[in-house]
Amino acid sequence: MKLRTLFYKFKKYLSFILIYLTVAGAYTFTAFIIEEAEQQVIWGTWPAQDAKNWELVLEGCDILDSLNTTMKWINWSIGYIQPLALISYHCYWQSTSYYIKSLKTKVFAKSPASFDGRYIEFMFTPKQIVQQDGKIFLVNGRIWIEVDERPITRTVEIKGIVKNKDNIITVRRKE
């Protein structure tokens, strides 16, 4: 009878271990597949950049951002079941967020018209300040930023909606 009780206890603990391994495996496998999908998109942005197809690069950023959001959601909802994977995938989505941000910066520098209608945040250094029709504009190349007053610092943080009209890029500031 003692051996039988020991067998049932062992079976019970083995069941818990198998359940844990199943859930942890489902989490890590899903996160791994998402990571692989993100890598495919990152690699896909390279030839698009070589071809100077900035709309396609921006589409890649959007896909990557969506995958990364899914990775964050999965990581913070059930990732605690596997702490080492949680840390690893946390680092991975942080670095992917950095890649997205830097790639969007490159696209904006090369093709600001690609952001027409999109909200964007960036640091802006004007080459000149223009007053026109009672408005103040910070200007650098084709990019015009309307401001309420002259900035105190040389570089200003801009947050707003991009508009492309007659090949002039304006950003309507949003605070």
Image: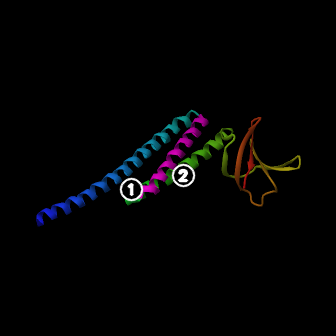
- Position of 141 relative to 123 (above/below): above
User: What element does badge 2 sit on?
Assistant: helix
Report x, y in % for residue 171.
74, 46
Residue 8 occupies which quadrant of the picture? bottom left
Mark 1 sits on what residue?
85
Position of the C terminus, as image quadrant, is: bottom right
Taking depth in this image into account, of 98 and 27 the one nearest to the observer is 27
Mark 2 sits on what residue?
98
Q: Main secondary structure of the magenta part?
A: helix
Please state which amino acid type lies under the numbered disc 1: Ala
Please state which amino acid type lies under the numbered disc 2: Tyr
Q: Is residue 57 magenta?
A: yes
What range of the chain is rendered magenta?
A: 52-79
Decide if residue 133 is on the left or right side of residue 146: right
Residue at 16% x, 61% y is 7
Taking depth in this image into account, of 96 and 76 the one nearest to the observer is 76
